[in-house]
Image (cartoon, rainbow, N blue to C red):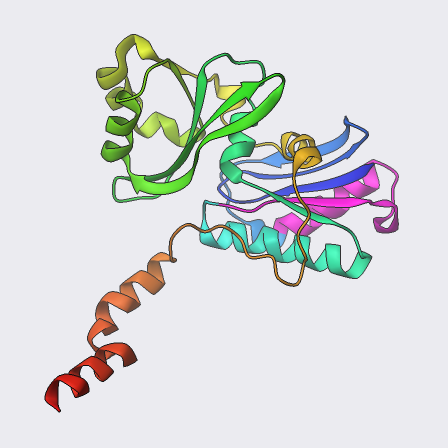
Amino acid sequence: MKILAIESSNQTMSAAVCENGRLIAEVTTNGNLQHSTQLMPAVDHVIRLAGWKPADLERIAVAKGPGSYTGVRIGATIAKTLAWTLALPLVPVSSLKVLAGNCEGAAEKIVPMIDARRGNCYTAVYQFEDGLLVERTADLHTASEDWFQRLLAEEGTYLFVGEDVSKYRERIGELFKGRALFAGESQDLPRASVLAALSDSGAAEDPHTFVPAYLKNPEAEEKWEEKHHSNRREDYVERVDASI
């Protein structure tokens, strides 16, 4: 099985091609947020490095979010377009699961975290069981303090992973003490090769109807909603009904 995997849900951009579980080529960059101009050339580059043509591909795997709205959308658009034009199965995988997948073999509960601003985060709990990465708590968008209290109420040790964990590391250490472990720097960046491996157990979706898992509205839309809330049609109907 020849797989193209695309991960662009946050600052890290990663593209990889794998064949039968073996990494053939991978390009990963971090911090430049130029996915709109660099992702497609990176995809083309790894396919050429493998000596393949697009027609050789047999599956497209893509990180479906959560994360940066723009980054997720760019990756999803490219993946959907390739899957449709090449008539290939499209397998979306959680961006948080990709991070958790970096911790292969860990015995602890794995807590991937992506900063969502304003003290909020995207997060979940995963755990390896018989070699498979299993979801213990579904991906969610939540206030970080609420999340930490929820985790504290459960038993066990947690392995926190993700580049954005550094923003919460002091607080995590203060609350969890010996119950918290932290992944190494090499594990904190999502990699498309890990995404490709996880797609083996994922379900394919129709490229036409696949929608990324943003988990929240984009910040611009939220601000618009706040500003225009009183002008929404349903509010207008309620006001009219009340006046009759």
Find residue 16 and report its horizontal and vertical position in percent: 71, 36
Residue 232 in view in this figure: no
Find residue 39 and report its horizontal and vertical position in percent: 64, 48
Number of callouts: 0
Image quadrant holding the C terminus, namely: bottom left
Query: Please, which residue is most extreme toward the left here?
Result: 243
In front here: 149 or 100? 149
Residue 47 is inside the magenta segment: yes
Find residue 67 and report its horizontal and vertical position in percent: 45, 45
Q: Residue at x 51, y 27 (%)?
A: 100
Residue 133 in view in this figure: yes
In front here: 220 or 126? 126
Compared across the picture, whether 73 is left or right of 137 comes to right
Compared across the picture, whether 235 is left or right of 95 comes to left
Residue 188 is inside the magenta segment: no
Find residue 71 and report its horizontal and vertical position in percent: 52, 50
Compared across the picture, whether 58 is left or right of 102 comes to right
Q: Residue at x 82, y 44 (%)?
A: 58
Q: Residue at x 60, y 53 (%)?
A: 76
Above-or-below relation of 5 to 24? below
Compared across the picture, whether 125 is left or right of 72 comes to left
Q: Which stretch did the figure color magenta? A: 38-65
Residue 151, image quadrant? top left
